[in-house]
Amino acid sequence: MAVGGRLREILPEIEWISDETLRRQVIDTLVDGLDQGGWTPDDLERMPFTLAKKSTLNFAQHVRSVTTVCARVAETFDTIYHGVDLALHKDVLLAGALLHDVGKLVEMEEADDGTFRKTHDGKLVRHPFSGLALATKHGLPAEVLHIIGTHSKEGDPYKRTPEAVILHYADFMNFDPIEG
């Protein structure tokens, strides 16, 4: 099975993006991150979603949960607010959610003993920046780049778009409650 097809199985939320070009760009960015980091799609289900806390949750689970939270928030806002005063670009939000941690694919490596650690580059360049570089390479729109670049503490000094605000909180809803 091709890498893109396997990615779609592991991250079925990719199919929620209605714009075919944007969906392809998301897949291409993920494939590039996997290639650069020396990973396979199956590794997404074994690598940790963070090195900052001890947790059994993996990268794929984290990305899927964050993406699902973002989708549900967008649906709720659309249902309740009917796009008045707060119209979200759902495809942009979904793409940003799927890619917010793509930089971790080059920030992290597996040691010979099976533990995970930061790469040399990952110690110097945090994942919002390396993720931004990967996504830029694949032509993702500035709105998605903004989400990737501002999703973590690095984005705190900047005004976030509504989609970036939702992703930021969805990400921390999936991080802060974890013990460790």
Image (cartoon, helix red, strand yellow):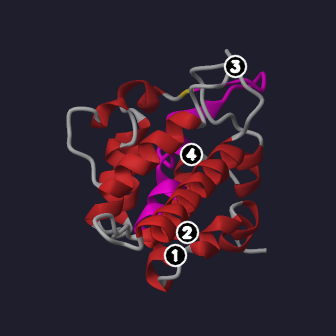
Residue 89, quarter of picture? bottom left
Disc 1 vs disc 2: Cβ atoms closer than 8 Å?
yes
Label 4, secondary structure: give it: helix
Closer to the observer: label 1 or label 2?
1
Residue at position x 77%, y 27% in the image: 114
| x then y, percent, for residue 74 | 49, 63
Look at mark 1 in the image and give the residue it sits on. Answer: 23
Label ID, residue 54: 3
Write the residue at 34% across / 69% down. Answer: 87
Side (left or right) of 131 relative to 46: left
Q: Which kind of residue does numbered mark 2 sit on? A: Ile
Q: Do the numbered discs 2 and 4 sit on residues whose CB atoms are within 8 Å?
A: no
Which quarter of the figure is the N terminus placed in?
A: bottom right
CB under 8 Å between callouts 3 and 2?
no
Q: Is residue 111 highlighted in magenta? A: yes
The answer for how far apart the CA atoms under marks 1 and 2 are is 6 Å
Residue bearing the label numbered 2: 27
User: Quarter-wise, where is residue 6 in the image?
Assistant: bottom right
Residue 70 in the magenta stretch? The answer is no
Tell me the distance, in whole angstroms, between the alpha carbons under discs 2 and 4.
Answer: 15 Å
Magenta stretch in the rendered image: 92-117
* Image side of residue 75 versus residue 21, left or right: right
Q: Is residue 134 left or right of residue 98?
A: left
Residue found at the far top of this picture: 180
The residue at 48%/65% (across/down) is: 80
Secondary structure beneath label 3: loop
Depth check: give the residue in front, 64 or 162: 162
Most extreme residue toward the bottom is: 20
Q: Secondary structure at mark 1?
A: helix
Above-or-below relation of 33 to 5: above
- Foreground mark, 4 or 3, reads 3
**Which marked residue is nearer to the observer: mark 1 or mark 4?**
1
